[in-house]
Structure formats: C-alpha cells, structure tokens
Amino acid sequence: MAFFFENIGFWFAVGLVFMGSWLLVTRAFGAQSVDASPIGFDLQLYKDQLTDLDKDASKGLLLPAETEQLRLEVSRRILEAERKSAATLLQPQGPNAGNRPSF
C-alpha cells in the first residue's frame, strides 16, 4: 500500500490517460448516427449539400440558374445513390447466397 501512495502522481496520470482514452472511444462510437455504409454516407453528404446550396442561394451567393442546375445535379446523385442502395438490398446475403438450389 505504501508503494501506491509513494507513486500517487504516476497513478493519477495513468488514470487521466485512461479516462481520456475511454471518453474518446465512447464518443467516437456514439457519434455514428449516420448509416455506416458508403452509400449511406453518400446520401447524407448529398442531403447536406442541398441544405448548403439553399443557404447559399438565400444569401444571394449563387444566381438562380446556377442554383437550379446544382440542385438538379445533387438530386440526380441522390437518386443514383438510392438506386445503388436498393440494388444492394436486393442482392442475396450470407455464406450460401449464390448456391441456393432451385426447385
């Protein structure tokens, strides 16, 4: 027990490092509210782009024609990402996905 009290500064530093690491790890895992798949990330990115586009347009940073053109492009990308997402969901899953017998 005397060893512990002689090195209290060391153990205090170890405790601080442990708590800091624990907070970083729990915060990193807790912050993933967005779909972790690449398609889910893309969808969230495109939706954020639309939001930013609307903000820029309301500030007058973009011409109306530019705004419409950019909105169409981002919307096209959203539709493409959703199409890929639907195609991924329809693919067979699991270890025997391609080896199913036909009756």
Image (spheres, rainbow, N blue to C red):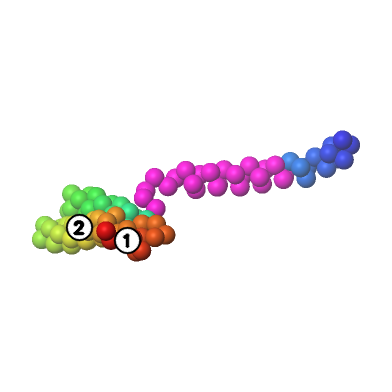
Location of residue 103 in the rendering, given as x and y in whole percent from the top left corner: 27, 58
Residue 101, numbered label: 1
Q: Residue at x 32, y 61 (%)?
A: 101
What amino acid type should be assigned to the residue bearing mark 2?
Leu
Q: Which residue is drawn at 76% across and 42% down?
A: 11
Residue 66, numbered label: none
Quadrant hosting residue 13: top right
- Inspect the magenta stretch and tell me whether residue 12 lies in it: no
Does residue 98 appear left or right of residue 54 in this picture? right
Relative to 96, residue 25 above or below? above
Relative to 51, residue 69 above or below? below
What amino acid type should be assigned to the residue bearing mark 1?
Pro
Q: Magenta span covers which residues?
A: 13-36
Going by the picture, which residue comes out furthest to the left? 65
Q: Which residue is drawn at 66% across and 45% down?
A: 18
Front position in the image: 15 or 86: 86
**Mark 1 touches mark 2? (CB < 8 Å):** no
Q: Which residue is drawn at 42% across and 47% down?
A: 32
Going by the picture, which residue comes out furthest to the bottom? 98
Tell me, yes or no, if residue 76 can be seen here: yes
- Inspect the magenta stretch and tell me whether residue 30 lies in it: yes
Quadrant hosting residue 93: bottom left
Count neighbours of disc 2 (C-alpha within 10 A) and say few if under 14, some if 14 to 19, many if 20 or more. Answer: few
Relative to 37, residue 33 above or below? above
Residue hosting label 2: 79
Q: Gap between marks 1 and 2, in whole Å? A: 34 Å
Location of residue 9 in the rendering, given as x and y in whole percent from the top left corner: 78, 42
Front position in the image: 38 or 95: 95
Mark 1 or 2 closer to N-term? Answer: 2
Dot 2: element: helix
Q: Is the magenta stretch mostly helix, strand or loop?
A: helix
Dot 1: element: loop
